[in-house]
Amino acid sequence: MPIEDIAKVLDKGEPILVFDDSQREGETDIFFSARHVTPASVRFLRKQGGGMVFLASDYAASEKLGLPFTQDLYSSVTPNSEEFDLLNGMLSHSLPYDKRSSFSLFINHKDTFTGITDNDRSLTAKSFAELMQESSHTTGIDCKVKMAQNFRIPGHVPICIADQKLLQGRQGHTELIIALMSFLNLTPVALGCEMLSDDGNALSPEEAQIWAQEQGYLFLEGRQIVERCQ
């Protein structure tokens, strides 16, 4: 499938699969365009993926909304603070697959109940995508006000922010899907989930690709996205 046709797939509310790299996480994530997410999309992710359902978000738009990286947030409260001394020790551990995590806040839309149901997470994801789309023609102050007015923390939908340099800075699933969506001129925010195996590990790329072929879904390798979108 030509990469340009992927926009049609995502705009129809259908999923695509993205494998990062065997030298990195070695995992396959399922992604939907967050703009077109429904409760059925969330149910699909948790049943067919099985990992954490998360939002992948563009760096510039996330910055406009005032979203911090979790690591920076924790680091800012630990200096000279006995109350949060535990965080210092926990932050000292390195990641086995990358230099830093892309995690930001865990959010719920203000109108959700617990925030964990398919309906609730769908509302959170779609509303966040709509705000991200609005941010392109809204001032930074207004974006932050709307973010605070419409979402609460802590919540059940984590946001992962792409690296500022995108694929030049990091080539995780977050950067791969955001680079792809940006290349396709789509609102750069996706709802994704890692694919897990019944043996307690991540689903192998071979198994993920076979499943995608059997179900009629597009399977992309990270290198394909890097070659086309970098």
Image: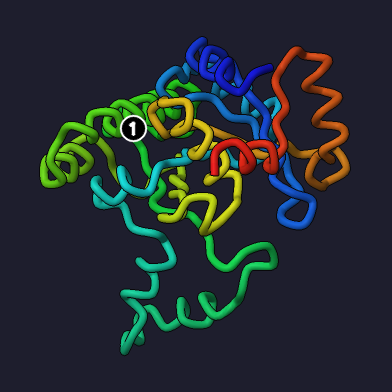
The picture places residue 216, in percent across and down from the top left corner, at 75, 12
Q: On the picture, is 119 further left or further right than 202? A: left
Image side of residue 128 versus residue 27, left or right: left
Disc 1: which residue: 128
Amino acid residing under circle 1? Phe
Q: Position of residue 96 (x, y in %)?
A: 69, 67
Q: Name above or below for residue 36 compared with residue 153.
A: above
Pick whichever, 76 or 39, lies toward us: 76
Circle 1 sits in a helix, a strand or a loop, which is it? helix
Residue at left 33%, top 58%? 68
Q: Measuring 62% from the left and 43% from the top, which residue is drawn there?
A: 226
Q: Is residue 94 left or right of residue 57?
A: right
Q: Residues within 10 Å of mark 1 (few under 14, many from 20)?
A: many
Residue 33 drawn at (x, y percent): 48, 24
Above or below 40: residue 150: below
- Residue in the foreground of this view, choosing between 139 and 128: 139
Give above or below for 207 relative to 171: above
At x 42%, y 83%, the residue is 85
The image quadrant of residue 20 is top right
| Quadrant position of the N terminus in the picture | top right
